[in-house]
Image: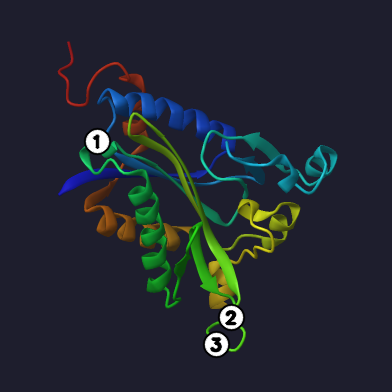
Amino acid sequence: MKSCRTIDLGKIAYGEAAALQQCLVAARKIGAAPDLVLFCEHPHVITLGRNGKHEHLHVSDDLLRQKCVEFHHSNRGGDITYHGPGQIVGYPILDLNGIRRDVVWYVRQLEECMIRATSSFGIPAFRVPGRAGVWVDGNKGDAASPREEKLAAIGVHISRWVTSHGFAYNVSTDLRFFELITPCGIAGCRATSLEKLLGVSVSPAEAIARLSAAFGEVFGLELNAAEATELDGWLASEGEPVGAPTP
């Protein structure tokens, strides 16, 4: 079983995380970093993917500043989304050359990770054809009036088969911030969170643990936590393959 490292970055600004991913992708391409998954939370931020439409942002720049919400363009796929406290964001940096070179398969696998993690909390989750992400029944199984609600979003970037960006999983997210946008560019889309569905608190650590377990199962990878010093080493040795002898 191939290994993959995980790092919990805690709370980190979106721009800082994007720059970090760019460096790690460059390192992964030349073998200076292993496959890894970054987990984090962002301060309030709205991002617009490369296929997004600016009209899906419903408020002015002035109102965003008043609400302390940043806005960033992103090179990920997908449309517009919100990130903020209480939402676990996962950024896999994987070399698909050694796994499977198939973009659609990769996105479906990310969905499967979150479907399994959600199921472990006792909540059925599912896909909606033609809409990337993970969905749940907001009416908790009421067949007479089903209401699809989005629990998690996906937007990826792949360069020379090395992945970046990834998924956003709502744990205790303040869902009012999704009212500032048309989530993922889908009219009428309702966002939900794990805590809203469960009616109890869930810690970020618990959510990350279940997402990590599902990620390892789905991709057939052995996940092991990495230390911050290892991250510094991968970045410092960007021009040198992992395991290369020190002169």
Which residue in the protein does label 1 denote? 97
* Residue in the image at 67% along x and 62% along y: 175
* Residue in the image at 32% along x and 39% along y: 94
- SS class of the residue under badge 1? helix
Report which quarter residue 38 is drawn in: top left
Which residue in the protein does label 2 denote? 146
Q: Is residue 169 visible?
A: no
Q: Position of residue 212 (x, y in %)?
A: 34, 56
Alpha-carbon distance for marks 1 and 2? Answer: 40 Å
* Quadrant showing the C terminus: top left
Is 16 left or right of 189, judged from the image as shown?
Answer: left
Q: Is residue 239 visible?
A: yes
Q: Position of residue 155 (x, y in %)?
A: 50, 45
Disc sitting over residue 143 in the figure: 3
* Residue, far top: 247
Disc sitting over residue 114 in the figure: none
Mark 1 residue crowding within 10 angstroms, few (<14) / some (14–19) / many (20+): few
Which is nearer the eye, 93 or 199?
Answer: 93
- SS class of the residue under badge 3? loop
Is 157 left or right of 101, judged from the image as shown?
Answer: right
Q: Which badge, 1 or 2, comes first in the chain's sequence?
A: 1
